[in-house]
């Protein structure tokens, strides 16, 4: 495996950084698009049903803000799609047969719907009927949501590869069941959790804008009516995110136990596991999980981790050391140690190389190739481990996962409480006369909600390191062979470009909000 | 459906998407002329608003073109995008700038000023077509890459050629910019650029109800047409006379074949017909438009040239792309290692994936239908300055 060292390590890290940068920026814009789509859709539906011009103004106001944000989501999205090819070319070949399909379906089914009807939504108020316009508004949101479905199917497949088989003749994984890929339970959970969390962002944004108007004592009718929509959407979505989050965690425990162990800083697992509320972990260094029994100053909720992972207070949850050294699952199946998996992975890779050589050699009567193929098939589930140089490489960076998970869950719980308070003031008190702290809290909740949302992605993506595709291909076998300098240059170009555009977008949004609805 | 049929079918679809993309480059073509077509600030805004209602189609077609290539020919995706890194990155940068510029350019608080964002639109209008055209030209001219699948298992094996696990390697450090050193790539790139300008001019003449802009457009149509014809005819002659990259469908061995593309057109006569019909339609549309104008800077009675020219462009580009991949031709030839060249047979997805995607592709007519319906609704009335002043506008 010496050849792995021929790749420039810094190039791999910069490629990861560039993809992470693009994804983080992309996720600043997309959730607002998905969330605002629901709220402006509801507002326009109110207009369609009541024919009151007030609702038209409300819908047009949110659509204007939607439009400012929409283009940035589109712009960062195209970079993400093409970066699979530009920076992860080996990945693109190794699993392109499976991974490319959801991206193509996304383009054909979702992007065209989105791009066609968004133009009607913005420019069609005087050109199409009210019904057609309403349909265009909802179809714009539906297109964005379908787009999210397919890209999350693709992402879920990387976390939990299903519906595929390795073909040694083509040297790649090939799809054997589209239904398994498109409807994988992992994908369904991921879609529900992600899209619902995006609705929260939209709702928090609208609530914050409305509360700002209330603070300033202007646009009160728009603010109150929009608050009614957004607070209900926000509360339903927050509770939904908690429920789907639980489901996602259970799925992670099953498919990516190392990710769960890293999220929990669980060094040694077992039954009756408690969920860590907080513990003191150095945020800048990997903890000494081999020698420490548990994270220091740990405050935990008894049995909660077992419930989260297995829906059983006495359920078994594997820790980092269990996974590294091998363990027996409650159902009796034995999970091999990582060292053994590495051994078997190397066997699989060697067998694949021998199979290929035998096939090309004119002297082989087919028996050598057949024998090597059998060795390959026996060890194929561990193929990716053959690229692992040391077992410590399969442990993701614990501090990021640990803290990001807590921020996500903590802010998520706070959001449920926040939306309940807003609804209380809306329906039981007078929100226009509510104390100023509530309005200011709403404004503060916007960055907090974004941080929580990005933290969710940090957990999802850092937690699966070093795998690009779980157990199948690590990052260093997935990259393109580029010079570090090239990737560094493009990284900083993207950084400057996206940051500048983000600043522009925020400034325009603030000006639009300050300006208020046009009539 | 046989595997071979599916390969041909998917090459057809990718080629069709490519052809539609070139047609939709009218957005870039018009943007590259935004200053000279628009005249003053209000005129520029009118031109930008006209293309601004279509830019998403071009953008989406580009994304779908990429997605369809990924799904159907993943080895091309990994080899070209990972190898010609800089070529694709520059294209992407320019399209990112374009995507935000429409929305931001005329908004209060855009920090950089309207002229900056309008400059981004012009930049994309020039860089986008030239480099996309250049990228397409490499289908005929070749690129500098090596594919060695054995790298994935053992860089030291006899079958491996380089010391890393990456199977697709660019054979020089320029990562795609070397293509721009080939004069024929530039000729084709600039031919696409001037074609985009012709399309942009015709689109603006059709879509914008403004006598001044139409008159300015008609003047610029002549110059772009002459430049396009010189470049396109030169490249076409070069293509028909050059050696091409053929492969043996049984052994998969790739070899140079004299007059390969000329022979492709002769052997696949229907492509030749497509090409000729396409070229005639392009010329007909342009000539009709030019000769309908009584004199330079006078209003032109004919404004429908975009339709024959648009259809002609789609047919012409489609025939060229099909010629690049069908009839046992290597569509992405390697100048570094002939046997690494990509063909529709050695770079495509599995039969299962192509079959699955075949069924997905049946949705395309439905998608096209609702695009046409929506487009007709929005374009029912020509865009004018009055609408920009009183209705929703960028």
Image: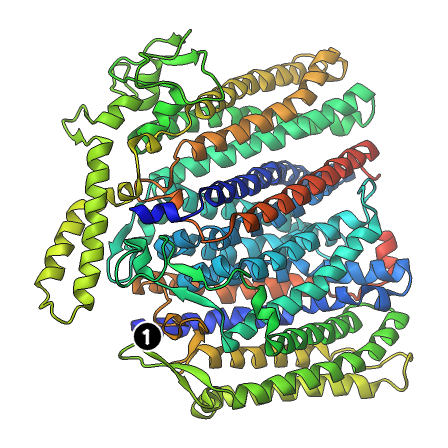
Residue depicted at x 62% and y 29%: A203
Q: Is residue A327 left or right of residue A509?
A: left
Residue drawn where x is 28% and y is 51% of the image? A164
Q: Nearer the viewer, residue A393 or A459?
A: A393
Q: Position of residue A17 (x, y in %)?
A: 52, 40
How many numbered marks are there?
Answer: 1
Tell me the residue that label 1 is attached to: B4
Q: Is residue A143 visible?
A: no
**Residue A198 placement: quadrant:** top right
Q: In this orientation, does residue B66 appear?
A: yes
| A239 relative to B93 in the view: left or right | left
Q: Quadrant of the C terminus of chain A?
A: top right
B54 or A136: which is nearer to us? B54
Work out whether residue B216 or residue B384 is closer to the camera in this orientation and state it. Answer: B216
Q: Position of residue B305 (x, y in %)?
A: 73, 80
Look at 39% across and 49% down and name the residue there.
Answer: A6
Q: Is residue B378 above or below residue A26?
A: below
The residue at the point 23 percent across, 43 percent down is: A345
Judging from the image, mark 1 belongs to the subunit labelled B
Please say if A402 is above or below B105.
Answer: above
**A303 versus B388 height, above or below:** above
In the image, residue B174 sits, relative to residue A50, either above or below, namely below
Q: Position of residue B115 (x, y in %)?
A: 84, 53
Q: Is label 1 in a helix, a strand or a loop?
A: helix
Q: Is residue B111 left or right of residue A456?
A: right
Residue B276 sits in quarter: bottom right
């Amino acid at each position: 495996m010496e050849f792995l060292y021929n790749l420039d390590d810094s190039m791999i890290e910069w490629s990861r950084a560039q993809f992470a940068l693009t994804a983080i920026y992309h996720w600043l814009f997309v959730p607002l698009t998905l969330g605002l789509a629901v709220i402006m859709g509801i507002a326009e539906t109110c207009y369609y049903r009541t024919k009151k011009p007030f609702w038209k103004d409300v819908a047009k106001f949110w659509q204007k803000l939607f439009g400012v944000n929409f283009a940035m989501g589109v712009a960062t999205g195209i970079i993400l799609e093409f970066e699979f090819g530009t920076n992860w070319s080996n990945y693109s070949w190794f699993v392109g047969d499976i991974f490319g399909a959801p991206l193509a379906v996304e383009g054909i089914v979702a992007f065209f719907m989105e791009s066609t009807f968004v133009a009607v939504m913005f420019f069609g108020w005087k050109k199409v009927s009210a019904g057609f316009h309403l349909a265009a508004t909802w179809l714009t949101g539906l297109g964005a949501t379908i787009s999210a479905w397919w890209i999350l199917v693709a992402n879920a497949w990387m976390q939990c590869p299903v519906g595929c088989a390795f073909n040694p003749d083509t040297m790649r994984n090939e799809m054997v069941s589209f239904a398994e890929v498109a409807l994988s339970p992992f994908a369904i959970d991921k879609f529900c959790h992600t899209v619902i969390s995006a609705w929260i962002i939209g709702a928090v944004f609208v609530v914050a804008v409305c509360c700002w108007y209330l603070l300033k004592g202007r646009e009160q009718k728009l603010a109150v009516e929009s608050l009614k929509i957004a607070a209900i959407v926000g509360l339903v979505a927050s509770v939904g995110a908690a429920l789907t989050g639980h489901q996602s965690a259970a799925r992670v425990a099953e498919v990516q136990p190392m990710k769960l162990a890293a999220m929990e800083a669980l060094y040694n697992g077992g039954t009756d596991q408690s969920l860590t509320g907080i513990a003191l972990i150095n945020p800048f260094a990997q903890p000494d999980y081999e020698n420490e029994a548990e994270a220091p100053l740990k405050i935990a909720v008894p049995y909660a981790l077992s419930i989260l992972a297995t829906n059983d207070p006495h359920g078994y949850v594997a820790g980092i050391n269990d996974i590294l050294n091998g363990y027996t699952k409650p159902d009796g199946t034995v999970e091999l140690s990582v060292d053994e998996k590495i051994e078997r992975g190397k066997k699989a890779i060697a067998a694949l190389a021998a199979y290929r050589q035998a096939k090309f050699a004119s002297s082989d009567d087919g028996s050598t190739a057949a024998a090597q193929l059998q060795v390959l098939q026996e060890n194929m589930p561990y193929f990716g481990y053959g690229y692992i140089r040391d077992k410590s490489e399969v442990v993701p960076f614990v501090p990021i996962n640990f803290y990001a998970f807590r921020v996500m869950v903590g802010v998520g719980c706070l959001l449920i409480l926040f939306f309940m308070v807003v609804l209380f003031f809306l329906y039981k008190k007078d929100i226009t006369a509510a104390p100023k702290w509530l309005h200011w809290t709403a404004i503060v909740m916007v960055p907090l909600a974004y941080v929580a949302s990005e933290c969710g992605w940090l957990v999802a993506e850092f937690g699966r390191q070093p795998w690009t595709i779980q157990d199948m291909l690590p990052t260093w076998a997935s990259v393109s062979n580029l010079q570090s300098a090239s990737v560094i240059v493009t990284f900083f170009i993207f950084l400057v470009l996206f940051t500048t555009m983000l600043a522009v977008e925020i400034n325009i949004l603030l000006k639009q909000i300050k300006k208020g609805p046009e009539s | 459906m046989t595997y071979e049929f599916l390969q041909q079918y998917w090459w057809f679809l990718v080629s069709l998407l490519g052809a539609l993309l070139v047609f939709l480059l009218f957005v870039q073509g018009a943007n590259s002329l935004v200053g000279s077509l628009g005249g003053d600030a209000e005129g520029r805004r009118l031109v930008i608003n006209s293309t601004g209602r279509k830019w998403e189609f071009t953008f989406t077609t580009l994304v779908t073109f990429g997605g369809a290539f990924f799904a159907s020919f993943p080895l091309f995706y990994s080899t070209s995008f990972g190898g010609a890194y800089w070529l694709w990155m520059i294209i992407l940068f320019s399209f990112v700038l374009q995507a935000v510029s429409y929305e931001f350019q005329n908004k209060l608080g855009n920090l950089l000023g309207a002229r900056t964002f309008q400059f981004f639109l012009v930049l994309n209008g020039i860089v986008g077509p030239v480099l996309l055209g250049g990228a397409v030209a490499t289908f005929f001219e070749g690129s500098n890459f090596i594919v060695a699948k054995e790298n994935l298992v053992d860089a030291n094996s006899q079958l491996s050629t380089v010391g890393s696990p990456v199977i697709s390697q660019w054979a020089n450090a320029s990562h795609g910019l070397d293509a721009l050193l080939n004069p024929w790539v530039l000729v084709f790139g600039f031919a696409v650029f001037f074609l985009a300008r012709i399309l942009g001019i015709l689109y603006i003449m059709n879509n914008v109800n403004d006598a001044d802009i139409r008159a300015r457009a008609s003047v610029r149509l002549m110059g772009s047409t002459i430049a396009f014809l010189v470049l396109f005819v030169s490249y076409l002659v070069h293509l028909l006379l050059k050696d091409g990259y053929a492969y043996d469908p049984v052994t998969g061995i790739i070899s140079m074949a004299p007059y390969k593309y000329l022979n492709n057109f002769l052997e696949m006569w229907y492509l030749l017909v497509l090409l000729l019909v396409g070229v005639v339609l392009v010329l007909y549309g342009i000539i009709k438009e030019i000769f309908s104008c009584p004199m330079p800077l006078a209003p032109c009675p004919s404004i429908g040239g975009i339709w024959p020219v648009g259809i002609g462009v789609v047919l012409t580009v489609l025939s060229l792309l099909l010629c690049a991949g069908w009839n046992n031709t290597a569509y992405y030839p390697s100048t570094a290692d002939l046997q690494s060249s990509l063909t529709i047979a050695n770079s495509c997805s599995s039969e299962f994936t192509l079959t699955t995607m075949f069924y997905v592709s049946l949705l395309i007519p439905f998608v096209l239908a609702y695009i046409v319906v929506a487009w007709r609704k929005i374009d029912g009335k020509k865009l004018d300055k009055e609408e920009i002043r009183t209705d929703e506008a960028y």
